[in-house]
Amino acid sequence: MPVLVMKFGGTSVATPDRIRRAAKRVGVEVSKGYDVIVIVSAMAGKTNELVGWVNETSPLFDAREYDAVVSSGEAVTAGLMALTLQEMDVPARSWQGWQVPLRTTSAHSAARIEEIPTDNINAKFAEGMRVAVVAGFQGVSPEGRITTLGRGGSDTTAVAFAAAFGAERCDIYTDVDGVYTTDPRISSKARKLDKIAFEEMLELASLGAKVLQTRSVELAMRYNVRLRVLSSFEEQSDNAGTLVCAEEEIMESKIVSGIAYSRDEAKMTLISVADRPGIAAAIFVPLSEAGVNVDMIIQNIAEEGRTDMTFSCPTDQVKRAEKALHDAKQRGEINYHDLVADMDVAKVSAVGIGMRSQSGVAAKMFQTLSDEGVNIKVIATSEIKISVLIDRKYMELAVQALHDAFELEKAA
Ligand code: ASP
Ligand code: MG
């Protein structure tokens, strides 16, 4: 029988009653003839509570025990979902990550999936079981310890199961009804997209559209898993939600598909560094070794052999970046007069696969910001994305103006 993966996020399993509603949706797919793998998150707020308990108990916690504690939220919902399905006479049972076993690396709290054997669950399907309920977010390390996949990791569990079982589709039930052209809380004109390409979703996910864990989109793209994002609170039709799929499946698309933003960016400037061969490596190698995710970089024109170097990184990595650069200076590897961190910035990006074949997107973006009097501090581009760093107080204005300028309220 064809396999479908259905993933329910925290708000969709927040209470026994919500679990019942989710289970009904599963029942509908079973009656259509699918064998279903259900991936569940912990009840809404549960993981945060568990993380809080760990921090309260042991501030410098052992990451293996952190995983033992925070993985428990999904254990509860998996069992409850299986019980609910059984009450509806749907043959179902639950699996914890280690029972599958979903094998991961030993990077506790940020483990990566290595392997999902299918024989165990397939044997049960062959015996007549119709739904395998699997606890999301958790797995088992080569050492036999429980691991977790990082916050939001159940999305990644779901996509990995869809790839391993060759599922027809992976439906992600969440509290929003799809992927929007921008955050509807910022622009009332935001429009739900029927389809979006993997590459675009990847940019939007990593740029701060928090619908899907970035890693899950990477996996979906690699294994060509068709992902559907939809709300568990609305009546569903067959084309509900947003389908995240290969570019070839999208007939019409606009040049720009969405405007993303991120508030959690900082701009760091090294003032007056020597402009010599190897200086970029001398700065960015220590940053990378310290685990700082540098995003945008600009090196200014040198005057009298000295230049300013500016880069952006997540705000919570500023301290680490400062230390790495300070240490490199102490070791005599770099020399600068000052290091200035600007925390009052935001990143706004236009994303779209259409940019590959169309020029003029950057010009239009810069003109729009200029018309609004918004100063651009740093620019970065990729094949399908243009990002600018601006003062945070103009972020909403910029998002709205760009959404208007690219006419995203209109369908392609
Ligand atoms: N419960 C975990 C979290 O809140 C994993 C997930 O829901 O995806 O991050
Ligand atoms: Mg999530």
Image (cartoon, grey):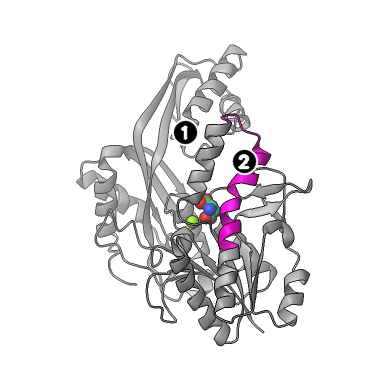
Q: Which amino acid lies under the numbered mark 1 shown in the image of this protein?
A: Asp
* Dot 1 or dot 2, earlier in sequence: 2
Percent x, y of residue 277 = 59, 25
119 vs 394: above or below: below
Q: Secondary structure at mark 2?
A: helix
Query: Is 99 situated above or below 272?
Result: below
Give above or below for 322 relative to 107: above
> Looking at the rendering, which quadrant does residue 68 occupy?
top right
The residue carrying pointer 1 sits among few (fewer than 14), some (14 to 19) or many (20 or more) residues within 10 Å by Cα, namely few
Q: Residue at horizontal 64%, vertical 63%?
A: 160
Q: How many residues crowd around disc 2 within 10 Å: few (fewer than 14), some, or many (20 or more)?
A: many
Residue placed at 58% from the left, 31% from the top?
58
In the rendering, which numbered label is found on residue 66?
2
How far apart are the alpha carbons under marks 1 and 2? Answer: 21 Å
Magenta stretch contains residue 397: no
Q: Residue visible at 58% across and 82% down?
A: 89
Q: Is residue 127 visible?
A: yes
Q: Which residues are magenta?
A: 58-78
Q: 177 or 401, which lies in front?
A: 177
Q: Quadrant of residue 298?
A: top left
- Residue 8 is labelled as none
- Specify the label residue 316 is tagged with: 1
Name the residue type under label 2. Answer: Tyr
Look at the picture and state if 216 lies above or below 375.
below
Badge count: 2
Q: Nearer the viewer, residue 395 or 114?
A: 114
Q: Is residue 63 magenta?
A: yes
The majority secondary structure of the magenta stretch comes to: helix
Image check: 390 left or right of 70? Answer: left
